[in-house]
Structure formats: structure tokens, C-alpha cells
Image (cartoon, grey):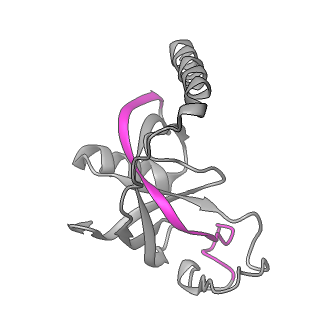
Amino acid sequence: MQHESNFIQQLPLFPLSTVLFPGGLLPLRIFEIRYLDMIKRCHANGSAFGVVTTMPSSWDTPTKPGFDDSSLRSEDEDGIEGFAPETFYPTGTLAHIQQLQHPQPGLISVRCVGGQRFKILTSEQKKFGLWLADIMLIDHDPVIPIPADLIPASETLQQLVRSMEQQL
């Protein structure tokens, strides 16, 4: 994986049916060979991988107006042998591994935290189903002060988050 300021080449992708937000926590139980290898390499190198959200259905889903997702599909219309065709949205979030455990052979448990968001420029699916993408990092959202009338709601939400964190 090459990294040049806002551009990263050959970022491994992990398509999921969920969204990872910057700063969000993502626990994963990894058992597929393509992802076991990816996670081991990322952990050994201290590098991130990309989490992208899969589209609700397969190839037959019409794309949104103005969105060309042809670069997000494998070249083979039927997908990689043994793997269902995957399509995913063209934006994602870098995932940084915070904790890794091997509870049993063939299984890795990881806890990841979301980093910076990115836009996929090109992607390709490799022989065993792993997706690699060239990406451009998206600037962080600007910090906007909480309006005075929403401060009580903000404080209540902060208390709720602290309470949930203590339960983890």
C-alpha cells in the first residue's frame, strides 16, 4: 500500500452492511481467509484498511443519477468464483486496529476505530475475493459550535454515551 498525502494506493477494503464513522468503534470477528490475511498484514504493518458499505442488493440495483459505479465492480459479471458479486458505495472510512485477539485457530477478533473518510477512485477484486482500491482522503468536517438551545440535548447525549462506554 503506497501513501502520498491525500492519495492512497492499493488500500484493502472490507465491505460490510454497516457504516463506520470517524471516531466510531467497530468490533469484528474475522474468519474468511481473504480477511484473516488482510487483518494480519494491517496489524503487522500498523496500517489501516477501508470499511465500505455494501449496497442493499446485487448488480441489478439501478445506480443513483450521476453515479457511475462501474469501477466498483469486478471485471467478471458473475463475480469471483466462490464469492457472490459485491457492490458498495464509493465512500468509506479508514479503520485502525486498536486490539487484536486470536480466540481460536481460524478466527481473529479485532476492535477498530474509524479514521478519516475517503472516496474510491478505482477498485479491483483480486483472485481470492479481496478488494483493493486507490482512494483520495476526504477533508475532515468543520467543527461547528452547538447552538445554545441544543446544549441540554447535547449534555444528555454525552451522559448516555458515557453510560454506554462503561457497559463495554
Q: Which residues are magenta?
A: 78-104
**Is 39 on the left-hand or right-hand side of 16?**
left
Q: Is residue 13 magenta?
A: no
Q: x, y (%) of residue 62?
A: 77, 81
Q: x, y (%) of residue 100?
A: 38, 32
Q: Is residue 11 above or below residue 106?
A: below
**Is 57 on the left-hand or right-hand side of 109?**
right
The residue at the point 42 percent across, 55 percent down is 141
The answer to whether any part of residue 165 appears in the image is yes
Q: Main secondary structure of the magenta part?
A: strand
The residue at the point 43 percent across, 30 percent down is 102
Residue 98 falls in image quadrant:
top left
- Please name whichever residue, 116 or 143, is drawn nearer the observer in this view of the structure: 143
- Please name whichever residue, 63 or 42, is drawn nearer the observer in this view of the structure: 63
Query: From this viewpoint, which residue is outermost toward the left?
Result: 4
The residue at the point 48 percent across, 73 percent down is 127
Q: Is residue 99 magenta?
A: yes
Q: Is residue 87 above or below residue 145?
A: below
The answer to whether any part of residue 129 appears in the image is no
Q: Which corner quadrant holds the N terminus?
A: bottom left
Residue 76 falls in image quadrant:
bottom right
